[in-house]
Image (cartoon, grey):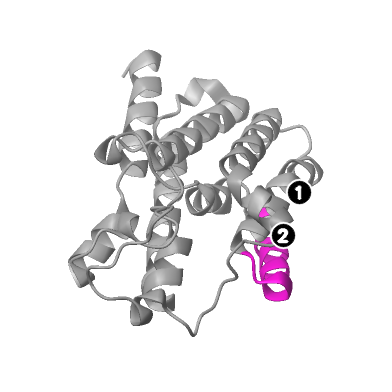
Amino acid sequence: MSEALRILGTTFGAYLVGSIPFAVIVVRLFWKQDIRDFGSGNTGATNVLRVFGAVPGLSVYALDALKGAAGVWLGILLVPEAWGATGRDWFIVLGAAAAIAGHTLSPFLGFRGGKGVATASGAIMVAAPRVALVMVALFVVIVAIWKYVSLGSIVIAVAFPVVCLVAYPGRYALAVFAVLVAAYVIWKHRTNIGRIRRGEEHRISFKRRMWDEMRPDSKTEGREER
C-alpha cells in the first residue's frame, strides 16, 4: 500500500468511525426519542447523562471514547514502517484528529455533533496514557468540587499541552496535537464559558434525570446550536 493510500485510509477511516452518533443511536434505541430535542440539544455523553441518567450517559461516553481510541489504533496499523517513531506519532495524531472531527462534524447529523471531549479522551488514553491519568484525575476533582462537566473539560483542555510536554518531551507531534485539541475544545465550549460566568450553567447530577420530569413529547426550547 502506498504512503498516500495509508494517509487517506487513516484520515477517512478514523473520520467515519468518529462520525457514528452513539448518543442519537442509544437514545432512539431505548427511548424512541431524539437527544437533540432535549437538554442542551448536544449529541454528547453529558447531555445524555443529564436527561436520561448515569447508565446511558456513561455508556455513550465509553462508546465515544472508543471512537478516539479506534482512530489512534488505525493510525498505528497503517503507518509505514520506514517512517519510524516520529512518523508513527504523526499517524497517531492524524487518526485521533480525524476521529474527533468525525464526532464534532458528523455527516449523519448534518455536519454537527458533540464537543469532542469524550472522543479526545479515548484517543489520549491510547496515544499518551501517562497524560490520560493526569487528565482523568484533574477532571474528576474539578467536577466533584464544582459539579460542572464543562468546567472540567475546559480545565483539562488548558492543562493538556503542558502535561503532554512534561510527560513526553521531544514528541512534537503529540505537542502539536495537544495545542490544537485544547484550542478546539475551548472554542466548542465558548457558550458554556459565558454561562459559567453568568452563573447559568447546569450542574451535573447522577441522581436526577430530566426525563423523569418531562412528558415524552416535551421539547426544550432555546437549545444550543451545535
Residue for point 77% across, 32% down = 170
- Amino acid identity at mark 2: Val
Say if mark 1 contacts mark 2, CB within 8 Å: yes
Q: Is residue 191 left or right of residue 144?
A: left
- Where is residue 155? Give x, y as percent: 72, 53
Identified at 31% across, 19% down, the residue is 1
Q: Please check the rendered image and state whether residue 222 is part of the magenta-colored stretch, yes or no.
A: no
Q: Quadrant of the C terminus?
A: top left
Q: Quadrant of residue 53?
A: bottom left
Q: Residue at x 45, y 24 (%)?
A: 80
Of 152 and 225, the residue lying toward us: 225
View extreme (front): residue? 221
Q: Which mark is residue 88?
A: none
Q: Which residues are magenta?
A: 131-148
> Is residue 135 rendered magenta in the image?
yes
Q: Secondary structure at mark 2?
A: helix
The amino acid on which the numbered mark 1 sits, given as a three-letter code, is Ala
- Residue at mark 1: 159
Q: Is residue 23 visible?
A: no
Q: Position of residue 84 (x, y in %)?
A: 57, 26
Q: What residue does disc 2 label?
A: 134
